[in-house]
Amino acid sequence: MSTAEQQIPAPVPAATQEQSEWDLRVELAAVYRLVAHFRMTDLIFSHISQRLPGDEPRFLINPYGLLFEEITASNLVEVGLDGELVTPSEYRVNPAGFVIHSAIHAARPDAHCVLHTHSRNGCAVAAQKNGLQPVNQTSMEFYNRIAYHDYEGVALNDAEKVRLVADLGDKNAMILRNHGLLTVGDSARRTFLRMFYLERACEMQVAAQSTGQELIVPSPEVCEHTARQLNNENRVGETDDHDNSDNWDLAWTALLRLVDRIAPDYRS
């Protein structure tokens, strides 16, 4: 075995519903640190939630008042569908900030993790009438596969939950108009990777628009073909995409190496 091969750890196993609560805490804390590292935070506002195993609905979420770069596996708080603490904690929570998350967790059993951001580029695209456009390969992952929800004010009203989940439907990514971005997934790692590429697609669109030149939009047929490739839907042996399970696991392993270098205390 070469020196290079010895230095690269084996891929982290894919996330499963059988992960222990501590493993879920560590993975979610890593995602918080990565969101901070890639500058997708909004100070102490916005959240990432993770469903915990068990018969009673329980979720991990960030303590209200901590920056994402301060989140650790042990200081994540446990809340119920009402956003209130279900186990004692030295930290407080913001139930109002859990409205969007609780709505999706309740309606989508497959949405084990919900990630919501107020990033600069995400909000810029969320303010555009036509939303995310297929003007780059990255954005084509979401072609006809992204939901939209119209702005109704600060998300504090339980009545909005019904409309929000209806707009999301069975999709795993959403643009909340005039508000921000949202992704869901069966694990924190996949939810983060989905958000990373959604954020990157928004960044590329804003950069392209800033040139003032007319943008090239491929045909609907090409966009759909590319979306199927990037979402591994063609099922003809095409694996050169970041939504393929093996590639996602490799990407997550690389991201863990990054967060272990820059913020190893997330595991504490």
Image (cartoon, helix red, strand yellow):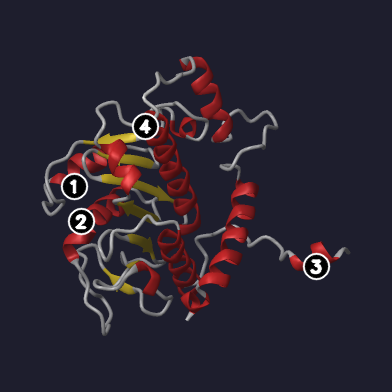
Amino acid residing under circle 1: Lys
Query: At 49% from the left edge and 17% from the top edge, which residue is drawn?
Result: 218
Query: At 67% from the left edge and 60% from the top edge, which residue is drawn?
Result: 11
| Mark 4 closeness class: few <14, some 14–19, many ≥20 residues within 10 Å | few
Residue 215 appears in view? yes
Cα distance, mark 1 to mark 4? 35 Å
Seen in the picture, residue 112 relative to 224 is either above or below; the reply is below
Viewer-nearest of discs 4 and 3: 4
Q: Position of residue 34 (x, y in %)?
A: 46, 61
Viewer-nearest of discs 1 and 4: 4
Amino acid residing under circle 4: Ser
Residue 6: numbered disc? 3
Tell me whether the residue at label 2 lies in contact with that at label 1, contact meaning CB atoms closer than 8 angstroms: yes
Dividing the picture into quadrants, the one containing residue 71 is bottom left
Disc on the earlier residue, 4 or 3: 3
Query: Residue tagged by mark 4?
Result: 210
Seen in the picture, residue 40 relative to 26 is either above or below; the reply is above
Viewer-nearest of discs 2 and 3: 3
Taking the image as shown, residue 202 lies to the left or right of residue 256, namely left
Cα distance, mark 4 to mark 3? 45 Å
Quarter of the figure that contains the N terminus: bottom right
Residue 99: numbered disc? 2
Q: Position of residue 79 (x, y in %)?
A: 27, 70
Tell me whether the residue at label 1 lies in contact with that at label 4, contact meaning CB atoms closer than 8 angstroms: no
Disc on the earlier residue, 2 or 1: 2
Query: Residue tagged by mark 1?
Result: 161
Cα distance, mark 2 to mark 1? 7 Å
Residue 35: numbered disc? none
Disc on the earlier residue, 4 or 2: 2
Tell me whether the residue at label 3 lies in contact with that at label 1, contact meaning CB atoms closer than 8 angstroms: no
